[in-house]
Amino acid sequence: MCGITGILTTGGEAARGEALRAAVERMTTTLTHRGPDDAGTWTAEAGASAVGLGFRRLAIIDLSPLGHQPMSSATGRFTMVFNGEVYNFQSLRRELSLSGARFRGGSDSEVILAAFERWGVEAAVPRFVGMFAIAVWDGERRALHLIRDRLGKKPLFVFRHPRGGLLTFGSELKALRAGPDFDAAIDTAALSAYLRYLYVPAPHCIYRHVRKLRPGHILTVTDPDQPLPESQPYWSVETAAARGLADPFTGSVEDATDQLERLLLEAVELRLQSDVPLGALLSGGIDSSTVVALMRARASGAVKTFTISFDVPEHDEARHAAAVARHLGTDHTELRLNGADALAVVPQLPVMFDEPFADPSQIPTFLVSRLARQEVTVALSGDGGDELFAGYNRYTAGRRLLRLAMQLPGPARRALGAAITHVSPAGWDRAYAAVAGVLPRRLKLRLPGAKAAKFGRFLAADSEALMYRSLVSAWDTPAALVNGATDAPGDLERILGASSPADLLARMMLADQVTYLADDLLAKVDRASMAVSLEARVPLLDHRVVEFSWRLPEAWKIRNGQGKWLLRQVLYRHVPESLVDRPKMGFSVPIEAWLRGPLRVWAEDLLSESSLAGTETLQSGPIRVAWGRFLNGDRRLALGLWGVLMYRSWHERWSI
């Protein structure tokens, strides 16, 4: 796991030779946290262009100097920097050896370059199983290829100067900012989207002239004087979904459970390859428990597991993680934290997430990564189960409500929504508390008032796509908060509004896999883990597991109102159902209580009239009104205000 950077330029002498090398080194130094073990740069002249590559190494496979990057292929045609892991490199190495390839060391980097030599870049990449961001210079074609893994586990940002002649790229935006002639103009449409989703959806970036390379794409650039060409897909979730739905699994439930277990065992086993200590992050939920159970089935020695606990019961799963760890016999470490421990992370967030990001689970993700890094360098994570196997409440309750809502005439539906939102979230909490004791288990809810407010906004939307968007929106009309912004539709609206897939659940899950999965979930895991030089591996998101999940019927994902049904059947083969079968608990922190309590002074300062005016991008009026309503008891505004605060904190750090 590493950090990569680079430059492609047609600038004059001031952008070549030692000046180019120095610029690459400055960019590379910003990524030391991603690779504390080694560093390297490489530059070359290429006719009218000059190219430079930079690398920071976190040594995982082949710790010797033979794993040093930038690395060139045997003939010298290809020179590469590579962030991530290609887990099937051993089988590729054997195949390439039969074709005459020779290897000096034992790293997957050498295998990748040999694959490029043997098959070419476009044909080699689909053979890789793993997580990666790759920049490779083809000296023969004088072309720079930028490549991102299928699901978007590893990031890659690309900046092209608006006047042309300069392209820079990097694993994080801080590397681009350290590069030559960076233009930091804010993209107001991206800011509006961020305030809605609490992340910036790809391919957009908070900076107007930066693009996020989409997952599963290759971008090839030969002339930085020309506008960036369109990147080309070699794999996509949308194609995997279409193929899976067209080829449904025809065996029995037992057959499907066997097949899923085999795929997951192989995915976990591949991710156990490491020349440094390895462990797992364990929350005690379905996903992480499944990963740890399969690790125990395949690991040759003891499995180290890590969890954190909070002094806020509704945010604490530690006792469940401990029970799973005891059953599986792992070497388990638990760290109990109080609010002050978590709050101490808040000032670090704008540096760690150098594009605005406001998923509150970023804090516990960082804390558990920091705990694990004290003993291991690699940790397996259980992320992805909700997206692949319909684990979110919005896939069950939300879909039922959407179907019912669409049966109502529009005016009646909107009137009902207005009536629901007329009652405060606190009022709904009191009403729910009065009847909660007699409700069946399937109707037990956390934060009923906030959910009622969300349901009211949901009913007011005009279409299925906009209803679903309301379920995942922190602000209903974020463009009203941003000077000069418009509310442009994106991938989520496109997928939800399409006629294919025909099934609503499939469209909901596909929209999340295309947007939220890469731009929120995986971005969070990457930045939080790499901030402490920890490599996080995500076996549930092996692309072959993703492809298989799309072949499964809905009834094997959701049964009796409970999601992840088939994944649970795999887990129950290893862990008693009683240890893991409980209502879903989010991996987060009590943002609402913090904003009313220990973070209130900090928030008041960032949301003051003068402070908001200093950003030149935000409308202070509606934000100040929302802050006042929140302090008067409107709980539903907490998440949206957290998004504003994270942007304000980010802006203070990076507007210099």
Image: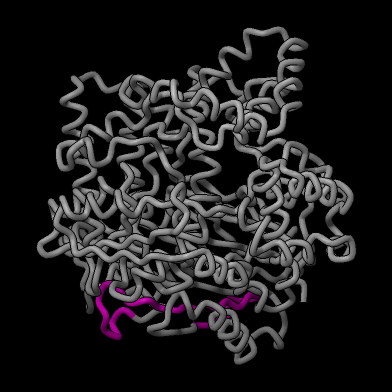
Q: Which residue is drawn at 28% across and 74% down?
A: 375
Q: Which of the pair 90/497 is nearer the observer?
A: 497
- Residue 499 against residue 204 in the figure, above or below: above
Quarter of the picture holding the N terminus: bottom left
| Observer able to see residue 93 | no
Side of 366 where 18 appears, left or right: right
Q: Which residue is drawn at 56% across and 18% down?
A: 401
- Residue 400 against residue 345 in the figure, above or below: above
Residue 340 coordinates in the image, percent (x, y): 54, 69
Q: Does the magenta stretch include residue 638?
A: no
Q: Which residue is drawn at 49% across and 84% down?
A: 41
Q: Which of the pair 456/140 is nearer the observer?
A: 456
Task: Tell me where residue 206 sits by quadrant.
Answer: bottom right
Which region shows up in magenta?
A: 42-67
Q: Which residue is drawn at 16% across and 33% down?
A: 258
**Total marks placed:** 0
Residue 560 coordinates in the image, percent (x, y): 35, 19
Q: Which of the pair 56/383 is nearer the observer?
A: 383
Most extreme residue toward the left, as rendered? Answer: 300
Q: How is the image coloured?
A: one colour
Q: Does the magenta stretch include residue 52?
A: yes
Residue 326 coordinates in the image, percent (x, y): 17, 54
Quarter of the picture holding the C terminus: bottom right
Task: Tell me where residue 473 sits by quadrant.
Answer: top right
| Observer able to see residue 414 | yes
Residue 635 coordinates in the image, percent (x, y): 67, 42
Task: Tell me where residue 248 sits by quadrant.
Answer: top left
- Residue 632 against residue 412 in the figure, above or below: below
